[in-house]
Amino acid sequence: MEQIKQCEKCGYLSYWDSYFQAYICNACHHKEKHIKNKYKVITLCGSTKFKDEFLKAQKELTLQGNIVISVGLFGHADGDYQTVLTEDIKIMLDDMHKRKIDMADEIYVINKDGYIGSSTRSEIEYAEDNGKIINYLEHIHDLIKDNGFL
């Protein structure tokens, strides 16, 4: 965020005041509250066995000023995968997650320890095909380096 901008009321310089969460003009003391015009929308993708990582990423990205879309349930982590999730429901959830990607500006892949399963891989491909920005919890380059491949 810019720390200095022109005052909308008088045209002089306004400075960001983090206490008031507003720009305050030095000349006329006008306070202009800062509200983002557009929040970035990020869809989380990854294996639902990484529930803690999903919740942590959701919290951090939200506190950074993003709208975060996540999974509807944690089938692997909560033990629902074999009992609640029939094949038809799994197909429906996979399709719903692609619609969540459609709504997003970017996706954030929860790839703990470098793990990317087949569903997540298809979501990454879908995001790429639709021009979405793709970010990762663990950067691919670092994973390769840490495992001695560079």
Image (tube, helix red, strand yellow):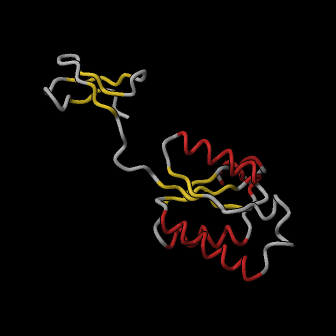
Residue situated in front as seen by the camera: 9 or 110: 9
Q: Quadrant of residue 73?
A: bottom right
Residue 69 falls left or right of residue 94: left
Location of residue 8 in the rendering, given as x and y in whole percent from the top left corner: 18, 32
Residue at image location 72% in from the left, 72% down from the top: 118
Residue 11 falls left or right of residue 140: left
Residue 73 falls left or right of residue 70: right
Residue situated in front as seen by the camera: 19 or 139: 19
Residue 29 falls left or right of residue 55: left
| Quadrant (top left, top right, bottom left, bottom right) of the N terminus | top left
Location of residue 30 in the rendering, given as x and y in whole percent from the top left corner: 23, 23
Location of residue 45 in the rendering, given as x and y in whole percent from the top left corner: 64, 61
In this rendering, is residue 95 above or below 101?
A: below
Q: Quadrant of residue 98?
A: bottom right
Residue at image location 55% in from the left, 53% down from the top: 68
Residue at image location 82% in from the left, 69% down from the top: 81
How many dots with numbers? 0
Location of residue 130 in the rendering, given as x and y in whole percent from the top left corner: 47, 71
Extreme residue in the left direction: 10
Extreme residue in the bottom direction: 88
In this rendering, is residue 132 above or below 87?
A: above
Residue situated in front as seen by the camera: 117 or 51: 51
Residue at image location 66% in from the left, 61% down from the top: 71
